[in-house]
Image (tube, coloured by chain):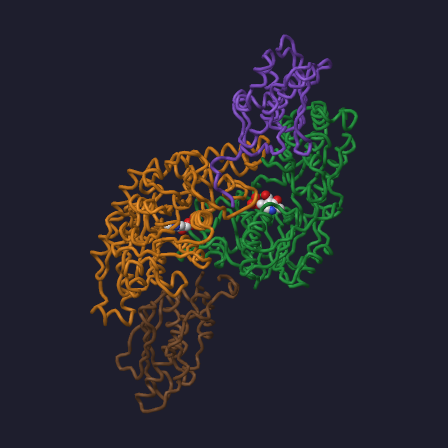
Chain colours: A brown, B purple, C orange, D green
Amino acid sequence: MLYSEKVMDHFNNPRNVGVLDDADGIGEVGNPVCGDVMKISIKVADDKIDDIRFQTLGCGAAIATSSIVTEMARGMSLEQAVAITKKQVAEELGGLPPAKMHCSVLATDGLKKAVDDYLVTHGRDPIAVGTIAHDDPEFDPHAEEHDDACEVTEE
Amino acid sequence: MLYSEKVMDHFNNPRNVGVLDDADGIGEVGNPVCGDVMKISIKVADDKIDDIRFQTLGCGAAIATSSIVTEMARGMSLEQAVAITKKQVAEELGGLPPAKMHCSVLATDGLKKAVDDYLVTHGRDPIAVGTIAHDDPEFDPHAEEHDDACEVTEE
Amino acid sequence: MEARDAYLDYAATTPVDERVLEAMLPYYTQVWGNPNSLYRRGREAYTALEAARERVVGAIGATHPNEVIFTAGGTEADNAALIGITTRARPDGGHLVVSAFEHHAVLEPAQFLEKSGYAVTYLAPRPAGYIDPEDLRNALRDDTVLVSVMHGNNEIGTLQPIRELAEVAHERGALFHTDAAQTLGKVPFNVADLGVDAASFSGHKIYGPKGVGALYLKRGTPFAPMVRGGGQEFKKRSGTQNVAGIVGFATALDLVLAELPEEAARLASLRERIVSGVTSTIENTIESASYPERLPNIAHMIIKGVEGEAMLLQLDAKGVAVSTGSACSSGSLEPSHVLLSIGCPPELAHGSVRVSVGRFTTAEDVEYFLEVFPPIVERLRMMSPLYAKMYGSATT
Amino acid sequence: MEARDAYLDYAATTPVDERVLEAMLPYYTQVWGNPNSLYRRGREAYTALEAARERVVGAIGATHPNEVIFTAGGTEADNAALIGITTRARPDGGHLVVSAFEHHAVLEPAQFLEKSGYAVTYLAPRPAGYIDPEDLRNALRDDTVLVSVMHGNNEIGTLQPIRELAEVAHERGALFHTDAAQTLGKVPFNVADLGVDAASFSGHKIYGPKGVGALYLKRGTPFAPMVRGGGQEFKKRSGTQNVAGIVGFATALDLVLAELPEEAARLASLRERIVSGVTSTIENTIESASYPERLPNIAHMIIKGVEGEAMLLQLDAKGVAVSTGSACSSGSLEPSHVLLSIGCPPELAHGSVRVSVGRFTTAEDVEYFLEVFPPIVERLRMMSPLYAKMYGSATT
Ligand SMILES: Cc1ncc(COP(=O)(O)O)c(C=O)c1O
Ligand SMILES: Cc1ncc(COP(=O)(O)O)c(C=O)c1O
């Protein structure tokens, strides 16, 4: 398993780390029992993401996907931000090892939660609800990341 | 599997090869289907083995045990000759690899047959009959040569 | 503070010692015959192979050359022991006991046997990190065919009371296997003293090559081969033998045993320094297992509120190599089954770090690690959304 | 006539080519990390491992890196293919077809499966030395899960019509495995051209190290691992990889393929010379199998009225290394199952000799063999109690 250079760059030099003191919306996903927790705080202006910060407890990929998603989202409309897919996050990082694909869900889910948090606290309808994988009690972050060559490996 | 130096010496320089033209007794044992056949011819004087020759089709151990048994038997009384055990043959050669132990039976059996042949053609009672492994239809030359560390190896 | 190359993961693998490589080289381009061939080149290879076997036999206190069979590593030896002994001794099913913190090379074949119809007890260690003989006694059944408990745990580094455990197993008529991949050459290992029926070893843990190991099988121990074919290794493991690798393994074993007493003391003091250095300078850190009998070379600690892979990668960026039991590093959802088995909560297991020292580790390597590690932990704790909440402050 | 060192048993094993050893060396003492570790040393080893895999994948015409898993040799690859595919594809039993002249590394696992409840057909080759696709068609059943026919026979050297055989198997819904230990690098081998689902390879037959091999498994082929543990090799073969050995294997394969066309022609003419030299100068000798499709490097002959091991040892005394299918040389009661399978009577099979040439064989080696061999045969025939009786005279 090798991380791309871009993953390592974002892991070693994560962008936008921290918490916005005057955040308009906050999203927190993950569980320390599973080893990764992410918190995103956003400032919103004109229904665009004006500022953004993250904090992440997790592996290299969790930190790198968190970092890049903040870069991707900055300046986006709320609709655009919640539409960022885990695939886009992984592509933006130059790919992720199969075993790490679930980390990009953490990042997109955190962002979605933050946007909905902003909307709901401002009396508006949430727009991401229903698409947040971590809200699904059946959600298994590792479900999709099997190596396809192993489809028929083990009993 | 390694042959001792003495085995290799007897294999490379077999003693007493040939057939005695005026043999008093001849013993032939083995089967080309099994890969080894041995023929011993003896001259007898005073109920002692006066001269002895062998011919062997077989592996290195078959040739070496044949060769040494002729050396051991020369000058022996007929009783002594038929009493030579396969263990003595193997010891005389400085040991044999376990998988080759059956070859020494070939040599002792050939000698026994030659002695009995002499006795019977001279109107006397055979003395080896009953102790010749190759006469036993159930005889499996390899039965005893399992490596004792493998006792419980295979199903 | 100059950047160094501080390899501190000797429990994962070791470099091949130059003296070992030297001993191996002739067997690639000079004595390269097939040891199963009868002519000179074959006999030369056979002689080298059997000489290597004799050395291993002597080194582990076995009594007969046929008691040691060479394998392609510790994993194969473990698989062969578990499956080979069990299926041969009790083809129609029965019961096995393996400790819950065995290496996957033992656990997975145990699970395979379970799926094939055997009953398996995964015996929990005590929280201090050892298997209690009384717990084993209670787990045994009349139909228990095999007990497998590792000699030294590869993560937390605790040694197991093998002699007592083997005795308990034998009293009940069960056979006993121990995975000694981590202990061979690090603590005295003698099959007669320990009273085991089977033991597994791995070359690349003792400055020998990867891809070679050995299985000790006491004479008379029931065994069905796993790899079948030409009948090499006394019909117990077929396949043309890796003569160079086997010579390397035997040479490595000789070297590691010759140096054992002094080296074990040296490593133990490095290990102590690591544990005390980390736990005294970084808050909310503890040693993972308290059992005092332990491998001299493995330090294992919980760094609360940090994820292991992130630590590992940051240390790597500083030239330090360690390992972790976090889920992320293994590509699985669960953190180390070893830590969970001794009662470590998953959120702490994710933050475990194993620092293991070896032949080429210097005191400077250790001091360097102790220097670069605290700021890394601090940085990661500061980046965590939970640390300040849970522990008050992220500073160390 | 000067004594030489004429190694003529390349089908048994080969020396490691100096260029291969050169390529391996860095992986013992420089790039020695565990390829499953995340830090730099691990990544370096991982990169080397995966680069070696890509080379093998490309060389055999596979399409995906995960289609090649590295093993400890041809024997392990054969065992894993037979048992892994069968038990995974049809856990509850079914039917297998293997040719009757497979290597023991295929036959023994087939027999193991038979004992475990599978039905096995040991398909007889035609006397010329090949498996006829029509015979295979007649052997197939609705529940046939796997067919295994070797690409080139290691004793008599005949090539098998793998493409046709695989087609016949596939038509009936069976999977197809071929043991290519003897053919890789000697005749073109491409998994797509041959249409096989699985294939086994061995390093030490191609001037690579002993104890390393590979198993090709086409994507989607059902497979249960034989060696279980840490999940290496895409969970298909656990155990820390023998990185140096694997790099050696890949390098050896590159070299052998680069030289294949010229080398095959050169070896074929040495082979022709051996066969015509022996059969024209020694009476009562014949080539064992007449099938014209054959490996360029293996000459196999019956020397009537002589026992093989005795020939082998006498040749050895002259510095010539060959092999034989006599019972004595194998330590079993039966002579070569390969010869028996093509209808050779046991008394002739005991007198078989295999002379196989390779990279370092010269025309002088061959001429030397042809010079020393006739007197050896004559001497042994003269020592035989049967030869004169059966064939008239012992002189050649
Ligand atoms: C305790 C233990 N058992 C087995 C193994 C497996 O050995 P190998 O890597 O040689 O397959 C290891 C190391 O990986 C180990 O630490
Ligand atoms: C056809 C064939 N299959 C399998 C093998 C076994 O390969 P290895 O010696 O690498 O186990 C050999 C050689 O011994 C062989 O000739």
Say which of B142 and A80 sits in front.
Answer: B142
Say which of B43 and A94 sits in front.
Answer: B43
Number of dots carrying numbers: 0
**On screen, residue C77 above or below B112:** below
Question: What is the quadrant of the C terminus of chain D in the image?
Answer: top right
**On screen, residue A87 above or below D344:** below
Say which of D273 and C101 sits in front.
Answer: C101
Q: Going by the image, does C256 lie left or right of D75?
A: left
Residue A137's image quarter? bottom left
Question: What is the quadrant of the N terminus of chain D in the image?
Answer: top right
Say which of D22 and D204 sits in front.
Answer: D204
Where residue C54 appears, x then y in whole percent?
A: 43, 33
Q: From where the camera sits, is residue C320 visible?
A: no
Where residue D329 appears, x then y in whole percent?
A: 61, 34
Residue at 79% over, 32% down: D280
Where residue D290 appears, x then y in whole percent?
A: 76, 43
Q: From where the camera sits, is residue C106 visible?
A: yes
Residue A48's image quarter? bottom left
Where residue B23 appears, x then y in whole percent?
A: 70, 14
Judged from this view, the residue extending furthest toward the bottom is A123
Residue at 74% over, 26% down: D387
Residue D322's image quarter? top right
**Quadrant of the image where one finds ligand 2:** top right
**On screen, residue D62 above or below D27:** below
